[in-house]
Image (cartoon, rainbow, N blue to C red):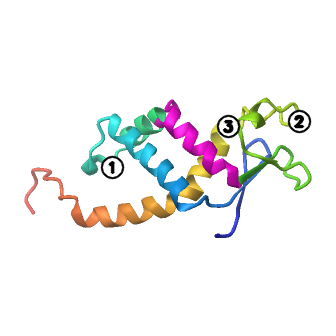
Amino acid sequence: MEAQSEFKLPSGATIVVSPAGFGVVKDLHDSVMKSFLSTGGKVEDIDSGDLIFKSLLSAGCSKEVENALFKCGENAFYSPDGSEEKRMKVSRALFDDPAAPAARADYYGIFMQIAKVNLEPFFSALFSVLKTFVPVRNTGSPQ
């Protein structure tokens, strides 16, 4: 398995994330892609800030994406004060744990880092491949 990545959240908490196994990450990948497509996303619009924002909102309220993120979260640990002694596995129970009252405020930060560690290899490769297939948009100006 690949090395762990550690991130400091705005609250001062830390999250340590190790990539999940291929099957688990592929489930996350597929659920995020479905969410993107449900917003009316098209390959040629992939760089649109508005589309990315809509996709994030759609993914944020998808039970399928949430379940896949929690499955990937089995390889992640949250520490409310950044110490190794207080690290807790990321799970649904974390967000009800009285030992981690700030966890709910860190919810999006936690899952953005889990998604980043697990999806970045897929999407960075996808974007570079798509550049070779996406037609250049005609802006109406002479070439």
**Structural crowding at the residue carrying mark 1, measured as other residues with C-alpha within 10 Å and reported as few (<14), some (14–19) or many (≥20):** some
Disc 3 residue type?
Tyr
Alpha carbon separation for disc pair 1 and 3: 26 Å
Q: Mark 3 sits on what residue? A: 107
Which residue is found at the position 65% from the left and 69% from the top? 1
Disc 2 residue type?
Ala
- What segment carries the magenta color? 59-75
Q: Principal SS element in the magenta part?
A: helix
Q: Identify the disc placed on residue 99.
A: 2
Left or right position of 2 against 47: right
Which residue is found at the position 7% from the left and 59% from the top? 142
Q: Position of residue 3 (x, y in %)?
A: 68, 69
Q: Which of 2/42 is in front?
A: 2
Which residue is found at the position 29% from the left and 61% from the top? 130
Q: Which of 22/69 is in front?
A: 22
Left or right position of 134 against 2: left
**Structural crowding at the residue carrying mark 2, measured as other residues with C-alpha within 10 Å and reported as few (<14), some (14–19) or many (≥20):** few
Alpha carbon separation for disc pair 3 and 2: 15 Å
Query: Looking at the picture, does residue 95 appear above or below residue 118?
Result: above
Q: Mark 1 sits on what residue? A: 46
Q: Position of residue 47 (x, y in %)?
A: 35, 50
Q: Which of 53/58 is in front?
A: 58
Residue 119 in view in this figure: yes
Of labels 1 and 3, earlier in sequence is 1
Nearer the observer: mark 1 or 3; the answer is 3
Of labels 3 and 2, earlier in sequence is 2
Residue 103 in view in this figure: no
